[in-house]
Image (spheres, coloured by chain):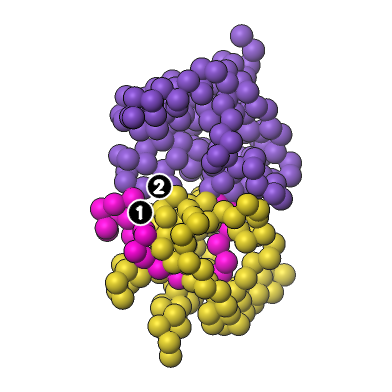
Chain colours: A yellow, B purple
């Protein structure tokens, strides 16, 4: 398994925790120098807060641990393409690298122009795409 | 003074609190049925958190008070045009009305296409524009 897959599996573990809690199953981890320094999953229902996406919670947790506001040397792994809010937050954090699993053509940041992310953020897409996408699809299928 | 000016003055009070704390002076209030239900100012430095913009804190505070995730019946007043992150958050909150003071051509959400906000959000711009803008301009002038 390559490095990206190993860490995306950690993000998937978080997404499954979200699912167990009745949340839209999206998970994220922040990796710095080969180590997971933050992990989070979507908690919008539990916290009754639309801003409590996995990425937002992971950013806050990671910067709190690092003691700085920026994540230049970090990679954020997230199972679903970040939304506009999270993309904007990742830009403010000057994220070094973003790796996501499934694309989100309706709500994702990549639809937007000009680009939402920080110009220096490296982006890798499609890591464990099917597994990440199926989780969300099945969640909504069960809701119907 | 019209209604929008009255509430924008409350947002300006919050922006001045931010300034006193050494934060970029942006303030916000959420109004529901003629009553201020949340007020917040930028706290990115104090909380060491790029996501702690006035609007984000105001959304979390307002929805916590209302006990629901949505702000359809609310107006958010903010002294500066929201950034992409905050615009995305306001969309998730299905905000009824956004009123802002000064435009932010470099960082504001309005540059983005397609539109970042919820399609039903009514937008009013330029309320006490000069006063709101001067606060931010003076803050950065002093920093140089």
**Which residue is tagged 1?**
A70
Q: Do the residues labelled 2 and 1 touch (CB within 8 Å)?
A: yes
Q: Residue A143 carries which label?
A: none
For label 1, the SS is loop
Residue nearer the viewer, B62 or A103: A103
Q: In this view, does B101 lie above or below B50?
A: above
Q: In which quarter of the image is residue B18?
A: top left
- Label 1 resides on the chain identified as A
**What residue is at 50 percent from the left and 30 percent from the top?**
B28
Say if residue B27 shows up in the picture.
Answer: yes
Expressed as whole percent of the image width and height from the top left, the position of residue B58 reads: 48, 37
Q: Seen from this angle, which residue lies furthest bottom? A: A1
> Could you tell me how many numbered marks the image carries?
2
Q: Is residue B76 left or right of residue B72?
A: left
Q: In this view, does A120 lie above or below B46?
A: below
Q: Is residue A33 magenta?
A: no
Residue stretch rendered in magenta on the structure: A62-86
Q: In this view, does B21 lie to the left or right of B52?
A: left
For label 2, the SS is loop
Task: Mark 1: give few (<14), some (14-19) or many (20+) Cα within 10 Å.
Answer: many
**What residue is at 40 percent from the left and 57 percent from the top?**
A59
Q: Is residue A74 magenta?
A: yes
Expressed as whole percent of the image width and height from the top left, the position of residue B87 reads: 59, 44
**What residue is at 56 percent from the left and 74 percent from the top?**
A125
Say if residue B66 shows up in the picture.
Answer: no
Task: Mark 2: give few (<14), some (14-19) or many (20+) Cα within 10 Å.
Answer: many
**Which residue is tagged 2?**
B50
Residue nearer the viewer, A107 or A110: A110
């Amino acid at each position: 398994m390559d490095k990206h897959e190993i860490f995306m599996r950690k993000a998937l573990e978080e997404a499954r925790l979200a699912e167990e809690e009745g949340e839209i199953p999206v998970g994220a981890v922040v990796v710095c120098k080969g180590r997971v320094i933050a992990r989070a999953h979507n908690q919008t229902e539990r916290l009754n807060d639309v801003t409590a996406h996995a990425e937002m919670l992971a950013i806050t947790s990671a910067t709190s641990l690092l003691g700085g506001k920026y994540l230049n040397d970090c990679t954020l792994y997230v199972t679903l393409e970040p939304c506009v809010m999270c993309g904007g937050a990742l830009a403010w954090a000057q994220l070094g690298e973003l790796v996501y699993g499934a694309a989100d053509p309706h709500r994702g940041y990549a639809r937007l122009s000009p680009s939402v992310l920080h110009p220096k953020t490296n982006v890798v897409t499609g890591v464990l795409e099917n597994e990440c996408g199926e989780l969300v699809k099945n969640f909504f299928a069960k809701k119907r």
